[in-house]
Image: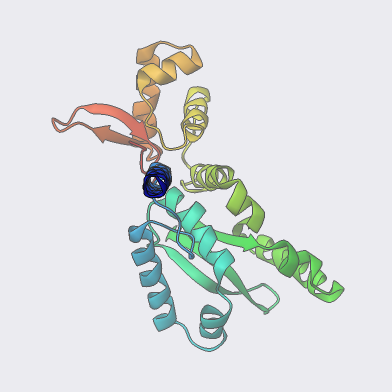
Amino acid sequence: MKNDRANGKQALLAMDGSRNRRKGDAARQVARSAVSAAGPQETANGSADPAFEHAYAQMMARALAESRGERKRRLQEEHGHAERMLAARVLWPAFGNLDHLHPEYEIRDIRGGVNFVDYAYMPSRQLELLLECDGFGPHWRDISRWQFDRNEERQNLLLLDEWRMLRFSYDAVMERTERCQQTVLLALAKWGQEETVRLGVYERAIMHFSLTCHGEKITPSLVAQELEIHRHTAMTHMRSLEEKGLLTPLLSPTGRRVGYTIPNQRPKR
């Protein structure tokens, strides 16, 4: 009898252990599925895009090879996490590449002082744009009155020398990324063309609408519905924007236009 009870107890323990193992296996499977559904995870450097990692490494290597003195020191010692996040989260999605981006760019102001900016974006003579990512501590909380005054004067002198500048807080880059991207795209639309380019009322409305689409392609039918105009009217103005270089056509394999997007902005699939 005792042997029967012992054997029964062992059988129950074995069944409990088997159930626990099955529960553990199921929990691990759920966890793996959740990670898989979440998509590629950001690395410690803030990017899961191998194309960005390669482009960023090339950009930094090129800048180091071309620099000397204080700029080289800043590239090696001060160009850090915040600047990398600005490139990875905002500039890379907006520009589509880092070809015309110059980190720790050196500028001499109109009073002869030397200034360094996080990035200068210079794809052409008509567009020379300065971009910076400012942390709350290093730029406001943890600086002296003299440093605060110097920062204000620095920006004034750069603007007086007709540089165009966009400054983003680190918090905005990390938490309001799409807003930062849209600001960059608005700057490209406003400053990226020759002064002789003039936009009509519908053309400006189409450009504004395209910037709110966050990379989705736009079509004449979609624009006509949004602006409450005829499809042919939308098509005429979109062709005009294409000729002015403000919209890029998306072509089918047969060469037919299937939509438009903003130059350098990769459409979402």
Quarter occupied by the C terminus: top left
Q: Where residue 239 appears, x then y in whole percent?
A: 34, 28
Say which of 234 and 85 sits in front: 85
Q: Residue at x 19, y 31 (%)?
A: 252
* Position of 201 relative to 14 (above/below): above
Say which of 50 and 246 sits in front: 50
Say which of 45 and 229 sits in front: 45
Q: Where residue 142 appears, x then y in whole percent?
A: 79, 71
- Is residue 108 found left or right of 248 in the rendered image? right
* Position of 169 relative to 262 (above/below): below
- Is residue 194 found left or right of 243 in the rendered image? right
Q: Where residue 150 appears, x then y in whole percent?
A: 77, 72
Q: Where residue 119 appears, x then y in whole percent?
A: 53, 65
* Position of 16 relative to 69 (above/below): above
Q: Which residue is drawn at 37% across and 31% down?
A: 217
Q: What color scheme is it?
A: rainbow
Q: Residue at x 68, y 79 (%)?
A: 113
Q: Which residue lies furthest to the bottom in this view?
A: 69
Q: Which quadrant holds residue 123? A: bottom left
Q: Which residue lies furthest to the front in this view?
A: 1
* Position of 257 relative to 98 (above/below): above
Say which of 230 and 95 sits in front: 95
Number of numbered tags placed on the structure image: 0
- Is residue 135 found left or right of 24 in the rendered image? right
Q: Which residue is drawn at 43% across and 15% down?
A: 224
